[in-house]
Image: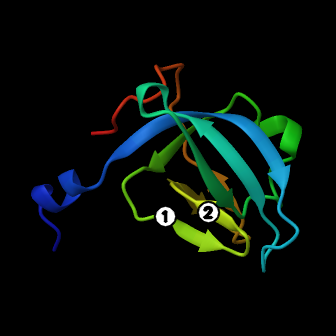
Amino acid sequence: MATYEDFLKLDIRVGRIIEVEDFPKAKKPAYKLKIDFGELGVKTSSAQITKLYKKEDLYNRLVVCVVNFPPKKIADFISEVLVLGVDDKEGNVVLLQPEREVKVGNKVY
């Protein structure tokens, strides 16, 4: 079992999607995201969320992300953060997000 100390090693923050692009070089359909984390700055992520989300629906959306994993190269793109989601009954990713407006960069506890 994981300990609370293990959980605290993860830096999970709220960010706001500020840019969305198609990612045709990804193996599976995905978007390239730029996410604003306030004082942490703007970070990039690749997200396989094209089935449920149109690009225009993602702008300005709050998302929950792990911000302290090592960057990962995906095709010609560096993904700096992991956007968190959960599968629906068809296996599509549903984004996790705060149920109210909160400050970007806030830590998840």
Q: Position of residue 39 (x, y in %)?
A: 42, 26
Asked if 50 appears above or below 96 in the picture, the reply is below
Residue 27 left/right relative to 15: right
Quarter of the figure with residue 79? bottom right
Q: Is residue 87 left or right of residue 75?
A: left
Q: How far apart are the alpha carbons under marks 1 and 2?
A: 6 Å
Image quarter for residue 52? bottom right
In this rendering, does residue 55 appear at all?
A: yes
- Three-letter amino acid code of the residue under disc 1: Pro
Q: Quadrant of residue 91?
A: bottom right
Q: Secondary structure at mark 2?
A: strand
Instruction: Tell me what residue is drawn at x 61 percent, y 63 percent.
Output: 78
* Residue 48 coordinates in the image, percent (x, y): 72, 64
Image location of residue 34, percent across then percent down: 67, 42
Identify the mark nearer the N-term, 1 or 2.
1
Q: Does the rendering let one see residue 87?
A: no
Q: Residues within 10 Å of mark 1 (few under 14, many from 20)?
A: some
Q: Does 25 appear above or below 86?
A: below
Please tell me which residue is depicted at 16% across the width and 74% down the height of the picture.
1
Residue designated by label 2: 78
Say if mark 1 contacts mark 2, CB within 8 Å: yes
Residue that carries the numbered disc 1 in the rendered image: 71
List x then y, in percent, for residue 6: 17, 62
Residue farthest along the bottom direction in this orientation = 27
Residue 58 — which label? Answer: none
In front of the other: 3 or 20: 20
Q: Nearer the viewer, residue 76 or 66?
A: 76
Q: Identify which amino acid the numbered label 2 is placed on.
A: Ile
Q: Is residue 63 above or below residue 16?
A: below
